[in-house]
Image: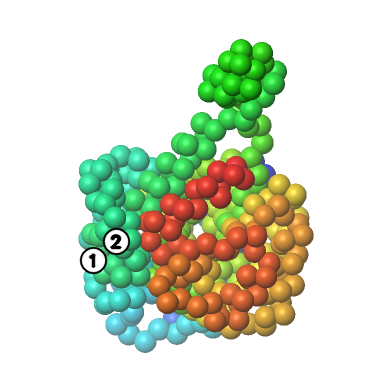
Amino acid sequence: MSSDLQLTRPEVVDTLTQRLLQFVHLARDNGYRVGVSEQLLVQQSIALIDPFCERQLRSLLRLILCSEKRDWHRFDELFNSFWHGERSRRQLKTAGTKGSALQLQTAADSHSKRNASSATQGDANQGEGEAEGAGQGYKEGASRSSSIEKVDFGSITDPEEMRRMEILIERLALNMRRRLSRRKQTSKRHGSVDLRRTMRRSLSTGGEPLALLRREARRRQPRMLLILDVSRSMSMYSFLMLRFARGIARIFRDVAVFAFHTHIVPITDALRQTSLARVRNSLNMLGSGWSGGTRIGESLNEFIQRYGSWMNSRTLTCILSDGYDTGDLAQLETALADIKQRGRNLLWINPLWQREGYSPEAKGMQVAMRFADQVAGAHNLETLRSLEPYFTRLA
């Protein structure tokens, strides 16, 4: 895990610093009296707070950037427009930024223009405890029925149902973690006696257990690399897949998680926040213009150039994407060939893969099929659950 922290934290700081400078430039272009000294002060002061705590960040930026009364009055509007993508009542200059905030839409966002404040408020105090406990009643009832197992994530429009599904998805990943943590391998000399295998082996010797078979914990897990597509075509599944990634990241001790649409962003530390509200805030601060177009090949090549040295022969790479790529397919081929060569296995998860009537017509998906060791679906709980044997075999 230490290698993961060394990998991501400097890059997270660098990405956040760039976003802060964009906001400072936005404030200046909208009439705030901001110069080099204020810009340097923001960069220096950010180390004094938790930058992923919105309240602290908002207060710090307001204190440094607002020199007049009118600046204070309109600061919240400017802040929310940049970090949350909220529409302003007045026309704001954009300081050259194409996308001011992470627009990570859930399925309900894509299907209707509902107000999801109730779901967000419910997530505010949610952490690992809710995923492991608060959804218990729902798990024991609906999740055991075939109906909830087969519900397509993209068809959920009710905020409460979406929140419950998010909890179930993370519970599924956490349950996989528990089962994997109990797995042991057969050993001739070490560990506890495996009575079942010993008795089975004794059948070949007339029931006499001439050799004791033992079990011991597996010594080394593979490195886990998760790369998530958060582009517009994945908007119905993106946040649910992030919840799944958040749970899977806890299975593997040595893990790194990235997101991309047109560029790659490290999000491991953001997903480790205990509160989902803070996860969203962290992603807002790291992302710019998410849920836009998709350039898979360029993003993966950027990953290789910046982080490729982190991979080794034990790396299990898991890419979650529908394969819709508006970029150069030659770059995608080059990137996947490189990732395949560097790592141990490549799993490509396409949320649409096992949907009835789906055909992999996307050119990017056709390229991915040539390089992936396995392609799997993830459009409902049933298909997500079917991934466990794959992770079990490799973990």
Please give the name of the residue rendered at 52% of the width and 38% of the height, measured from the top-left corner. 180
Secondary structure beneath label 2: helix
Where residue 354 sits, quadrant-wise, is bottom left
Q: Which mark is residue 243?
A: none
As measured in the structure, the alpha-carbon distance from the residue carrying label 2 to the one carrying label 1 is 6 Å
Please give the name of the residue rendered at 35% of the width and 70% of the height, measured from the top-left corner. 154
Q: Which one is nearer the viewer's eye here, 258 or 39? A: 258
Q: Which mark is residue 158?
A: 1
For the residue marked with disc 1, what is the amino acid? Asp
From the viewer's perspective, is residue 187 above or below residue 288?
above
Q: Are marks 2 and 1 in contact (CB under 8 Å)?
A: yes
Q: Which one is nearer the viewer's eye here, 286 or 364? A: 364
From the viewer's perspective, is residue 243 above or below residue 132?
below
Q: Give residue 255's position: percent from left, percent from top.
A: 60, 48
For the residue marked with disc 2, what is the amino acid? Met
Q: Which one is nearer the viewer's eye here, 72 or 321? A: 321
From the viewer's perspective, is residue 253 above or below residue 229?
above
Please give the name of the residue rendered at 47% of the width and 37% of the height, measured from the top-left corner. 179
Q: How is the image coloured?
A: rainbow
> In the visual, does 342 lie left or right of 195?
right
Q: Residue furthest front?
A: 206
Q: Give residue 185's position: percent from left, percent from top.
A: 62, 30
> In the visual, does 135 lie left or right of 94?
left
Q: Which residue is mark 2?
A: 162
